[in-house]
C-alpha cells in the first residue's frame, strides 16, 4: 500500500508540471492582451500600459514567465491578484472555508444519492436501470463542472425556481421550512458603511462579514465564531446606513471585553442626534461609552451636527488607545515630527465652521432639531406602513429608514424613478431592493408632500409595469440582482472611470443604453434581454417574500 501511494505521488508530480505547462502555454499564446481593459480608456496611454507590463513582468517571453511563476509556486508565493490587489494566498484562505462547506455538502449529497443508486444498479446488473445510471455517470464525469453547474442553475434555479441564486437576508430559522430556505443559500451581505471596505482594501486588512438577523440587525450570536487571534477590531453601527437600525452594541461589548478586542462604534450618522433624541424621551438601545467594551466612537459633525463637510470626530475611551492613531518620527533631519492623523496638514476653515455651528445650536438647538427630525421620521414611517404595496425594512430607530415593495406588480426602483421625476432625491438599496430616506428636521414641513407623491408614484408604477424595464430602474435592477458580482464591479468601474476622462459628461443612469451596431450589438441586446428577464423574475420573487 505504501509503495502504491509513493508511485502515485511520483507520477502526480510530473503530471501536474506538464498540465501547468500546457495551460500556461495556451494562455500565453492565446490572442488578446491582459491589459485590454485599459485599451479603450484614453486616460491610460500606451506608454503607461507598457510600464504596467514591465512592472508585472508580462513583457518578457512566456517561457521565462513560466519559470518565474513555477519558482514562486515552489516557494509558496502565488503573487497578487490583478483584480483585487490582494495576495492570492489571502484570497484562497478567505474563500477556503466556504468552499469546503460547499464541496463537503456536495459530497454528502452525492453519497446519499450515489450509494443507494449504486447498490440498486449492482443488484439489477445489466438492467435498464443499471445501464441508464452508468450512462449518466459517464456523462457527468465527461462534462466540465462549470458547464454542468450552469446547466443545473438554469434548470433548477431559473426555470424550476427550486433554488435561489440571490441571497435573502431576512430569513429567521424558526421552523423546518425556514431551515430549508437557509440551507439553500450561502453568503450574506452586511450593513457596515462601505468606507470600511474601502479602508480594508487600502490597508490590506481582511474583513470578516457578520450576517444579519430577521430584523436586519447584525447577528451578535454569530460573532464569536468569526473572531480569532488576528482580529484587530469589532465594528458596530449606530445606526447602520441602509435601514437605520442600531446594532446590538451591548452584546458586542460583552464579547469584546471577554476576548480583549477593541470595539469601535460607527456613529457617523447618529452621533450628533441619537443623544438628543434620548434627551427628548426617545427609548433607544445603548450604543455609546455607557456600554463596557466600547473603546472608540466616530461621529460626523457634517451630518446631524449641521456643519459643512470636512470636519468629523473620533473619540477614545482613554489616551492609551489614542496613541495608536498618532505618528511620531524622531530622526527626521527636519526635526522631530508628530502627526495625529493621516493628513499632515489639515484645513482649519472646516473646523472653525463646525465649531461655529455647534456654538450656534447648542444643546437646546440640537434637541429641537432632534425633536422635529423624530416627528418627520415617525410620520414617514407610519405613512409608508399605511400603503399596502410597501413595507418598512427592519426596525429602524431613526433618523434613517429603508422601504421596499411587497407587491410583485410594483417595482421599487421604478417607484424611485417616479419620485426623481417629481423632484425628490432618492437613494437605492439592494439585498433586499429598496429606497432610502435620510430624514432631517426640514423634512417635517414637506412630509405630507413626500407621502402624497410616493403614493402617486406607486399608483403610476402599478398601472404601468413596463416602467421597471426603463431608466435607472432597469440599471439598478440589473446591478442588484445579477449573480456575476465581479462583472457588476467591472461595469461600474468602467462607467465611473469614464466620468474622469477629458470632456466627459455627467453619468445619467436614467438614460437607456444605445445599442451597438452589427453582430456585437445584437448579441449584447440578447444578453441584456435575458438578464432583464432574470432580474424581473428575482424581483417578483423578492416581493412575494
Image (spheres, rainbow, N blue to C red):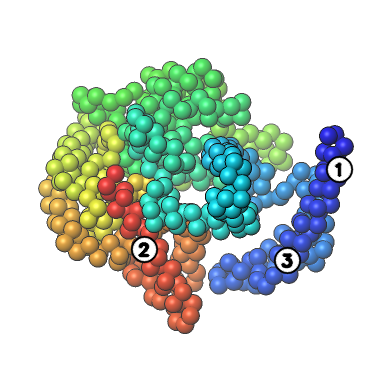
Secondary structure under tag 3 reads helix
Where is mark 3, residue-wise? 26
Q: Is residue 185 left or right of residue 42?
A: left
Query: Which quarter of the figure is the N terminus placed in?
Result: top right
482 over 470 or under it: above or below: above
**Which of the two discs, 3 and 1, sits closer to the camera?**
1
Where is mark 2, residue-wise? 532
Secondary structure under tag 1 reads helix
Q: Is residue 152 left or right of residue 338?
A: left
Q: Nearer the viewer, residue 382 or 115?
A: 115
Q: Nearer the viewer, residue 333 or 31?
A: 31
Where is mark 1, residue-wise? 7
172 over 514 or under it: above or below: above
**Which of the two discs, 2 and 1, sits closer to the camera?**
1
Q: Is residue 460 left or right of residue 144?
A: left
Residue at 48%, 62% in the rendered image:
491
Secondary structure under tag 2 reads helix
Q: How far apart, in angstroms, are the residues tagged by discs 3 and 1?
A: 29 Å
Residue at 70%, 39% in the rendered image:
332
Q: How far apart, in angstroms, are the residues tagged by discs 2 and 1?
A: 53 Å
**Percent of width and height locating residue 509:** 35, 64
**Percent of width and height locating residue 23:** 73, 61
Query: Nearer the N terminus, badge 3 or badge 2?
Result: 3
Asked which quadrant contains residue 310, the reply is top left
**Mark identifier at residue 87:** none
**Percent of width and height locating residue 489:** 49, 56
Query: Nearer the N terminus, badge 3 or badge 1?
Result: 1
Residue at 24%, 41% in the rendered image:
392
Asked which quadrant contains residue 49, the reply is bottom right
Cβ atoms at labels 2 and 1 below 8 Å apart: no
Mark 3 nearby-residue class (10 Å; few <14, some 14–19, many ≥20): few
Amino acid at each position: 500500500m505504501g509503495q502504491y501511494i509513493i508511485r502515485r505521488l511520483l507520477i502526480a508530480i510530473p503530471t501536474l508540471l506538464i498540465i501547468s505547462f500546457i495551460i500556461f502555454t495556451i494562455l500565453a499564446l492565446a490572442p488578446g492582451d491582459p491589459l485590454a481593459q485599459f485599451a479603450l480608456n484614453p486616460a491610460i496611454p500606451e506608454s503607461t500600459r507598457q510600464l504596467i507590463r514591465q512592472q508585472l513582468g508580462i513583457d518578457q517571453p512566456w517561457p521565462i514567465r513560466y519559470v518565474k511563476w513555477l519558482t514562486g509556486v515552489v516557494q509558496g508565493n502565488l503573487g497578487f491578484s490583478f483584480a483585487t490587489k490582494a495576495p492570492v494566498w489571502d484570497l484562497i484562505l478567505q474563500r477556503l472555508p466556504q468552499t469546503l462547506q460547499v464541496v463537503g455538502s456536495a459530497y454528502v449529497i452525492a453519497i446519499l444519492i450515489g450509494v443507494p443508486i449504486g447498490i440498486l444498479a449492482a443488484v439489477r446488473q445489466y438492467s435498464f436501470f443499471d445501464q441508464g445510471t452508468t450512462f449518466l455517470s459517464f456523462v457527468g464525469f465527461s462534462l466540465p463542472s462549470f458547464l454542468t453547474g450552469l446547466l443545473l442553475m438554469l434548470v433548477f434555479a431559473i426555470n424550476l425556481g427550486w433554488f435561489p441564486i440571490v441571497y435573502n437576508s431576512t430569513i429567521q430559522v424558526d421552523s423546518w421550512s425556514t431551515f430549508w430556505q437557509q440551507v439553500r443559500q450561502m453568503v450574506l451581505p452586511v450593513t457596515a458603511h462601505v468606507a470600511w471596505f474601502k479602508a480594508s482594501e487600502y490597508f490590506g486588512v481582511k474583513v470578516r462579514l457578520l450576517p444579519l438577523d430577521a430584523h436586519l440587525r447584525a447577528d451578535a450570536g454569530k460573532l464569536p465564531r468569526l473572531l480569532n487571534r488576528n482580529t484587530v477590531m469589532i465594528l458596530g453601527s449606530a445606526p447602520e446606513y441602509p435601514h437605520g437600525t442600531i446594532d446590538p452594541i451591548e452584546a458586542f461589548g460583552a464579547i469584546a471585553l471577554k476576548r480583549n478586542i477593541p470595539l469601535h462604534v460607527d456613529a457617523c450618522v447618529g452621533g450628533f442626534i441619537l443623544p438628543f433624541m434620548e434627551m427628548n424621551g426617545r427609548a433607544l438601545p445603548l450604543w455609546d461609552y455607557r456600554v463596557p467594551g466600547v473603546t472608540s466612537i466616530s461621529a460626523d459633525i457634517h451630518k446631524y451636527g449641521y456643519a459643512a463637510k470636512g470636519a468629523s470626530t473620533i473619540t477614545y475611551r482613554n489616551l492609551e488607545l489614542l496613541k495608536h492613531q498618532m505618528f511620531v518620527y524622531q530622526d527626521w533631519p527636519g526635526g522631530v515630527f508628530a502627526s495625529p492623523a493621516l493628513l499632515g496638514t489639515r484645513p482649519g476653515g472646516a473646523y472653525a465652521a463646525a465649531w461655529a455651528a455647534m456654538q450656534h445650536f447648542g444643546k437646546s438647538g440640537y434637541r429641537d432639531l432632534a425633536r422635529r427630525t423624530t416627528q418627520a421620521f415617525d410620520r414617514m414611517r407610519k405613512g409608508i406602513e399605511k400603503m399596502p404595496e410597501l413595507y418598512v425594512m427592519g426596525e429602524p430607530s431613526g433618523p434613517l429608514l429603508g422601504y421596499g415593495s411587497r407587491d410583485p406588480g410594483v417595482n421599487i426602483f421604478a417607484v424611485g424613478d417616479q419620485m426623481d421625476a417629481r423632484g425628490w432625491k432618492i437613494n437605492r438599496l439592494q439585498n433586499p431592493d429598496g429606497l432610502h430616506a435620510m430624514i432631517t428636521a426640514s423634512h417635517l414641513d414637506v412630509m405630507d408632500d413626500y407621502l402624497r407623491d410616493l403614493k402617486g408614484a406607486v399608483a403610476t408604477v402599478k398601472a404601468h409595469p413596463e416602467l421597471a424595464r426603463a431608466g435607472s430602474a432597469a440599471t439598478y435592477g440589473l446591478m442588484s440582482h445579477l449573480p456575476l458580482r465581479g462583472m457588476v464591479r467591472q461595469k461600474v468601474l468602467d462607467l465611473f472611470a469614464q466620468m474622469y476622462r477629458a470632456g466627459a459628461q455627467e453619468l445619467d443612469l436614467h438614460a437607456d443604453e444605445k445599442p451597438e451596431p452589427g453582430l456585437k450589438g445584437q448579441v449584447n441586446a440578447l444578453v441584456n434581454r435575458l438578464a432583464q428577464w432574470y432580474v424581473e423574475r428575482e424581483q417578483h420573487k423578492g416581493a412575494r417574500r
